[in-house]
Amino acid sequence: MRHKIIRLLSTALVLMGSVVAQVEAAPILWDSGTGSNGNAYEYIAGTITWSAAKAAAEGMTFNGATGHLVTLHSNEEASFINPLYSSDPNTAVFGPWIGLNDIAVEGTYAWVTGEAYTYSNFSAGEPNNVGNEDGIHFWGAASGRPLGSWNDWQIIATNGGGYIVEFESSEMASVPEPAVFSLLLLGLAGMRYSSKKRKA
Ligand SMILES: [Ca+2]
Ligand SMILES: [Ca+2]
Ligand SMILES: [Ca+2]
């Protein structure tokens, strides 16, 4: 019986692991160094418009936190994020979309989360709103501009550089995967109960 329980338990753990991998994002925590905020960041590769990237980011979860397109407040935050994407050749010129836009009022820039717009890193000559550009992205390493500097670009244009999603530490659960852990305990209790019942 004990062997059977161990076998069942390991099967359950493997199954839960694969379910978690499908649902959960796998971002990197910024939890050390100057200005670190405990938030988690992930580069998602792909060819996508700014609007679709915004929706995709907001459809992701990590440890209880809902994602959003990245919001930046310091050079330190930018320095943490740049290496997440800069080695992907797809970001060589057009790097990932970020959560800044001037969709509501032309020339008035706002973060998707409503956070204060207190930090800016536009490339020289940008934003220039050529053809109504309202979504912001990073320039890539081979763009001829500083890596990670910003450009405004049309939100309906696809950008092959993907996007960066951010998860707020304030929204994260303190204990990882509480729901899955409870299920595991329930399952163990159930197996004990049925094994006792058979013996009785
Ligand atoms: Ca942020
Ligand atoms: Ca604009
Ligand atoms: Ca521009």
Image (tube, helix red, strand yellow):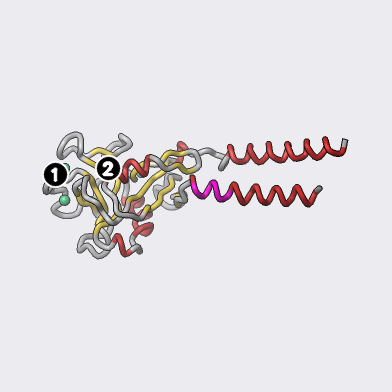
Dot label at residue 132: 1
Image coordinates of residue 116 in percent, x first then y, are 29, 36
> Which three-letter amino acid code belongs to the residue tagged 2?
Ser
Give the quarter of the image for residue 145: bottom left
Q: Nearer the viewer, residue 42 or 156?
A: 156
Classify mark 1 as within 8 Å of ligand 2 or not, answering yes or no.
yes
Image coordinates of residue 90 in percent, x first then y, are 30, 61
Of helix, strand and loop, which mostly describes the magenta segment?
helix
Image coordinates of residue 102 in percent, x first then y, are 20, 39
Dot label at residue 51: 2
Residue 160 against residue 57 in the figure, above or below: below
> Which three-letter amino acid code belongs to the residue tagged 1?
Asn
Image coordinates of residue 81 in percent, x first then y, are 36, 54
Q: Nearer the viewer, residue 146 or 130?
A: 130
Q: Identify the residue at horizontal 19%, vertical 49% (top origin).
A: 153
Q: Identify the residue at horizontal 33%, vertical 61% (top origin).
A: 86
